[in-house]
Amino acid sequence: MKIVNKALTDMDGEPLKSGDIAMTVANILMNVALAPPQSEDPTKPPKPLKPEESMTRYELARMLHGVALNESFDVPVEQVARLQKDMGFMYAPLVAGQVNSIIEGGRADEKAEPKKPK
């Protein structure tokens, strides 16, 4: 799946940063790929990654590390699905929602029009 590395913004369109580093789709996905697994059930410990999945995620993170802003990159669909699921454990909706919107072909850099109450 081809994904474009876009910068993430706050609700007013200002760039989101982690320290001095701009938050982008690629660096969010890289962080998710490198993070330890999370458990869907907080009462149970997470299942460890199989060695093959650890290697796959590491290689993906290495590839994402060098992606420039507005450059596109390819990620296998099955890896995208796993990263999207794991991202929900790590990031707030402001970040995860934008990344998912960009992955699904939306444009997170356009300010959404507020919906009028009914």
Image (cartoon, helix red, strand yellow):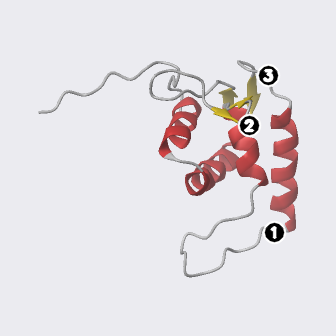
Where is residue 89, by image quadrant?
Answer: bottom right
**Residue 44 position within the rendered picture, expressed as x and y whole percent measured from the top left:** 60, 81
What is the CA distance from the residue labelled 2 to the residue labelled 3?
Answer: 10 Å
- Mark 2 lies on residue: 27
Q: Residue at x 74, y 30 (%)?
A: 20
Residue at 58% over, 36% down? 99
Which of labels 1 and 3 is toward the front?
3
Q: Quadrant of the N terminus?
A: top right
Q: Nearer the viewer, residue 50 or 39?
A: 39
Residue at mark 1 to residue at mark 2: CA–CA distance: 23 Å
**Mark closest to the chain's N terminus, 1 or 2:** 2
Q: As shown in the figure, which amino acid type bears the numbered disc 3? A: Ala
Q: CA distance from mark 1 to mark 3?
A: 30 Å
Q: Mark 2 or 3 closer to N-term?
A: 2
Q: Position of residue 29 (x, y in %)?
A: 70, 42
Mark 2: amino acid? Asn
In this view of the protein, which residue sits in the foreground, 100 or 28?
Answer: 28
Q: Which residue is tagged 1?
A: 50
Residue at position x 60%, y 24% from top?
A: 15
- The nearer-to-camera label among 1 and 2 is 2
Graded by Cα atoms within 10 Å as few (under 14), some (14 to 19) or many (20 or more), the crowding at tag 2 reads: some
Q: Is residue 1 visible?
A: no
Callout 1 amino acid:
Lys
Residue 33 x, y percent position in the rendering: 75, 50
Would you say 14 lies left or right of 34 here? Answer: left
Badge 3 is on which residue?
A: 68
Can you see residue 74?
Answer: yes
Q: Residues within 10 Å of mark 1 (few under 14, many from 20)?
A: few
Q: Say above or below: 7 vs 61.
A: above
Q: Which is more N-terminal, label 3 or label 1?
A: 1
